[in-house]
Amino acid sequence: MENLKAKKYEDLLVSNGLKRTGARLQVLEILSNRNSATSQPYLENVVGKDIDRVTLYRILKAFEEKGIIHKVIDNQGTANYAICSDGCSANRHEDGHVHFNCSKCLRVYCLDEVKIPTLKLPKDFKVEQVNLIVSGICSRCRASN
Ligand SMILES: [Zn+2]
Ligand SMILES: [Zn+2]
Ligand SMILES: [Zn+2]
């Protein structure tokens, strides 16, 4: 099972024209293994011993450009990263879902099944990107109450 997963990450890198490096695989694995988005401070903390900040920054930027991950700025202004849906490709993200920021545990969730509604903008305004963050208490925190 572990080998299969590792193979999947390697394929993902190769199919996006990225070299298989230990650092890239490590970042990909951490981002994939969480059911919520991963915050940058958490990521830096976990990989800090192995990957310096500049390298980490470059890896995240490359993943974002290739349509592998998307960035979500939460209500505290912290960057979070989540694995993209299959519809995303290089320079074209199709993550039209709502993000949920829990005000208790501060986690950011991708609510894949909740689509951002189409907005009717004034004439002559062109949409480039829409971010919708809903804040509240997540199911996990509610259950532990
Ligand atoms: Zn995406
Ligand atoms: Zn929570
Ligand atoms: Zn998302």
Image: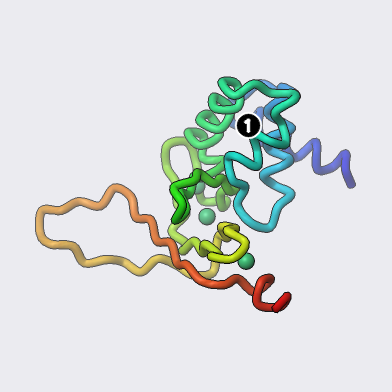
Residue type pointed to by label 1: Ser
The quadrant in which residue 25 appears is top right
Mark 1 crowd level (few <14, some 14–19, many ≥20, 10 Å Cα): few
Q: Position of residue 69 (x, y in %)?
A: 55, 43
Q: Residue furthest left?
A: 123
Q: Quadrant of residue 4?
A: top right
Position of 12 compared to 87: left or right? right
- Residue 83: give x, y in percent of width and height: 60, 47
Number of marks in picture: 1
Question: What residue do we see at 74% from left, 33% from top?
Answer: 26
Q: Secondary structure at mark 1?
A: helix
Q: How was this image coloured?
A: rainbow
**Closer to the camera in the image, 56 or 129:** 56
Q: Nearer the viewer, residue 25 or 30?
A: 30
User: What's the residue at 66%, 71% (across, down)?
Assistant: 141
- In the rendered image, the vertical position of residue 3 relative to residue 125, given as above or below: above
**x then y, percent, for residue 10:** 73, 32
Residue at point 10% right, 59% down? Answer: 123
Which residue is depicted at the point 65% across and 77% down? 142
**Residue under pointer 1:** 15
Is 118 situated left or right of 66 in this image? Answer: left
Q: Is residue 88 left or right of 19 when viewed as pictured?
A: left
